[in-house]
Image (spheres, rainbow, N blue to C red):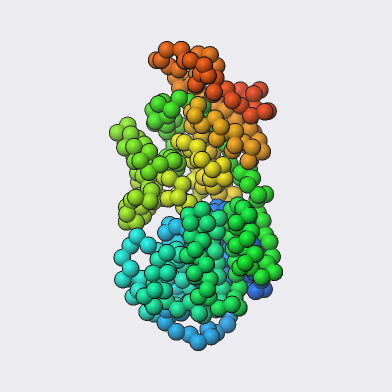
């Protein structure tokens, strides 16, 4: 089937097909195939899909088509017909970039609203005619308070990454925003995970929704090759520098648990001659945008990020993710590795795990329902059970060394080293 018929088969109109051809897409992703016809039919949607699945086009394309095919009811300035709520500024900016890109041959003005930047240009933009607003909840409410935006004409509401919005404490803001919307509207809710809280939220918002799910719940992407490197915590930074140099990784996204840790690691890598920058919530929006831009254009090779800063980052075909520290919440591991192996490409995710993190590792392996392969590097081996950590006297029981040995059932027979199967010879954290 040709490109045009593959997307046209979903019912998309010519201006959108042209924009998709410009974007160079060959075929719809599974979430797009499932979601687009349902949204075009006016259905509410409950979608289990992570960033990287093509979910943004899955909602932006049919929304553009619906809005362009029907006249606005009482059109006015600052009165959007579609509202997309996202948890982070970065995601808002990326969704808006998709709106502009896919909507380039349609006349549907849009704008993006998020905090951390001067409010005045946003106020100015809202004075124009406005079909689509992409916003983070807090700043949107600021504009509501200043009467810059009127949400009574919203025909379509999208909650993108709803699970993360709840994690970030936006539930009260969301409820306030819902009260400002007309009762009759189409609702689309996207979430990577489905907690009870998400189910309650969706039950209160969605009306007879179609459910679409592209990857089994909490299943790590099959396209991502996952490995664990057990290492003492004080060796982690040297090990990472070593691996980046050894494998000549050119584009690595590294996750740390804290903002301070992100800064320290970026400084250490820089002092080792590896171009790196940190992004996290304490950085100004300008600094975050600059670092992301430099990373995307490969002017810096390593981006060190905290979970919230990295959430939803759209960096095409990222080959390598490193968990410098494991996240406290196992589901965040799945989000993190979702940054690689995106939209059909393979990727690799390496986790550096110290003795204190063995419990977190077990939790992750339980969640993804399989053990993660162990790899090691000469000079950075984790201590064997009963051995002294490097340069230190033998430990008292329970030793740090023995805590390293807390392995999940089924992983004990795995040997460190290169693994067979997928991966295509991509350099990894294994002994080579
Ligand atoms: P998303 O999950 O929406 O963040 O999209 C992830 C990435 O996949 C983005 O870089 C999109 O531009 C890209 N993408 C979306 N749909 C397709 C498609 N049908 N073919 C190829 N790439 C796509």
| In the depicted structure, whether residue 362 falls above or below residue 149 | above
Q: Please report the residue visible at 50 percent of the width from the left and 40 percent of the height from the top.
A: 327
- Residue 162 as seen in the image, left or right of residue 270: right
Residue 108 visible in the snapshot? no
Total marks placed: 0
Using the rendered image of the protein, determine whether residue 269 is visible from the camera's viewpoint. yes
Name the residue rendered at 46%, 47% in the picture: 307
Task: Please give left or right for residue 257 compared with residue 348 in the image.
Answer: left
Tell me where residue 310 appears, x and y as whole percent: 45, 49
Q: Please report the residue visible at 39 percent of the width from the left and 30 percent of the height from the top.
A: 237
The answer to which image quadrant residue 30 occupies is bottom right
Q: Residue at x 53, y 38 (%)?
A: 349
From the top left corner, tell me how far across and down residue 408 is, in percent. Answer: 64, 29
User: Among all residues in the image, which is located at the extreme bottom?
Assistant: 74
x, y percent for residue 183: 59, 77
98 or 48: nearer the viewer: 48
**Does 275 sit above or below residue 90?**
above
> Residue 261: percent from the left, percent from the top?
38, 38
Quadrant location, the N terminus:
bottom right
């Amino acid at each position: 089937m040709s490109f045009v018929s593959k997307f046209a088969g979903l019912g998309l109109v010519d201006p959108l097909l042209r924009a998709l051809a410009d974007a160079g897409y060959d075929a719809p992703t599974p979430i797009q195939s499932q979601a687009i016809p349902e949204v075009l039919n006016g259905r509410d949607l409950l979608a289990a899909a992570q960033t990287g699945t093509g979910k943004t086009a899955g909602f932006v394309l049919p929304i553009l088509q619906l809005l362009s095919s029907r006249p606005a009811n009482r059109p006015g300035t600052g009165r959007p017909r579609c509202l997309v709520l996202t948890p982070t500024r970065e995601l808002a900016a990326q969704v808006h970039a998709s709106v502009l890109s896919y909507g380039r041959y349609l006349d549907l003005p849009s704008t993006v609203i998020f905090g951390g930047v001067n409010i005045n240009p946003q106020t100015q933009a809202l004075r124009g005619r406005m079909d689509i607003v992409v916003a983070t909840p807090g700043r949107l409410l600021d504009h509501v308070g200043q009467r810059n935006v009127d949400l009574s004409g919203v025909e379509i509401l999208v909650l993108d990454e709803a699970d993360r919005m709840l994690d970030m404490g936006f539930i009260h803001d969301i409820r306030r925003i819902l009260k400002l919307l007309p009762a009759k509207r189409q609702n689309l809710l996207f979430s990577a995970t489905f907690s009870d809280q998400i189910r309650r939220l969706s039950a209160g918002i969605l009306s007879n929704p179609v459910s679409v799910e592209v990857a089994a719940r909490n299943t790590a992407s099959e396209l991502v090759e996952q490995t664990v490197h057990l290492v003492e915590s004080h060796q982690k930074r040297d090990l990472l520098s070593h691996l980046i140099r050894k494998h000549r990784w050119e584009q690595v996204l590294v996750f740390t648990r804290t903002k301070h840790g992100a800064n320290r690691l970026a400084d250490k890598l820089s002092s080792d001659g590896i171009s790196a920058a940190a992004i996290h919530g304490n950085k100004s929006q300008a600094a975050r945008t600059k670092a992301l831009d430099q990373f995307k254009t490969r002017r810096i090779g390593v981006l060190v990020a905290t979970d919230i800063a990295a959430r939803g980052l759209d960096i095409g075909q990222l080959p390598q993710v490193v968990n410098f520290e494991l996240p406290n919440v196992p589901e965040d591991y799945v989000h993190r590795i979702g940054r690689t192996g995106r939209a059909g490409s393979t990727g690799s995710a390496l986790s550096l795990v110290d003795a204190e993190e063995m419990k977190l590792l077990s939790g992750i392996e339980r969640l993804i329902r399989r053990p993660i392969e162990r790899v090691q590097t000469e000079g950075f081996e984790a201590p064997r059970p009963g051995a002294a950590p490097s340069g230190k006297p033998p430990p008292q029981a329970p030793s740090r060394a023995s805590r390293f040995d807390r392995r999940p059932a089924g992983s004990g027979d795995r040997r460190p080293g290169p693994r067979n199967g997928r991966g295509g010879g991509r350099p990894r954290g294994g002994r080579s």
